[in-house]
Image (spheres, rainbow, N blue to C red):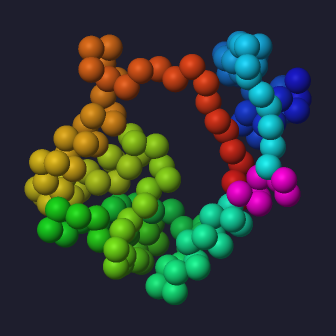
Amino acid sequence: LDMLCFLLQGLPAAGTMNAVMAYMLADWYRPGVTLDFPKGGSGAIAEALVRGIEKQKQSKVITRAHVEEILVENGAACGVRLKNGDVVKASRAVVSNADPFVTKGMLSNARAAGLTGAEMDAHMDKLTDTSEESGIPMLKSFIHIHAG
């Protein structure tokens, strides 16, 4: 149980809420479910992502840098402001690995200033719609990766 809890959230069973364990075990015993792990451990996933990104000469990965805000100009994401105040400009794209709710929050200043545009606003609203009528349906499974 300690191993399963660690794989789920990085804590032993004693530090895992019962609801989390119940969800995990219910998912685990569904037909066709598999527990797998990457060759080289979860750090190998992060290393492969960095290698893929940094193959492009103008691309770089900055680690241990909390993004405070996604910057927008002319209706497109153009960079990020880090928590320490540094600004990192993007020449082609800003990719957010955060969930849609966090990403929407990082766009909130640009949206309030009218910089995001109707198309981006509608897209982010749809991604974060949790209503039963038109929202994103509840997933029947999950993936959890400790990536460094």
Q: Identify the residue at horizontal 40%, vertical 77% (top origin).
A: 88
Q: Position of residue 118 (x, y in %)?
A: 12, 48
Residue at the front extreme? 32
Is 40 included in the stretch rendered in magenta? yes
Q: Nearer the viewer, residue 80 or 27?
A: 27
Is 28 above or below relative to 4? above
Give the extent of the magenta segment. Answer: 39-45
From this viewpoint, is residue 18 visible?
no
Q: Identify the residue at horizontal 36%, vertical 68% (top origin).
A: 93
Q: Position of residue 108 (x, y in %)?
A: 26, 51
Is 48 above or below relative to 145? below
**Number of marks in picture:** 0
Is 83 above or below relative to 142? below
Q: Position of residue 22 (x, y in %)?
A: 71, 14
- Left or right, 102 with respect to 146, comes to left
Q: Identify the residue at horizontal 73%, vertical 13% (top origin).
A: 31
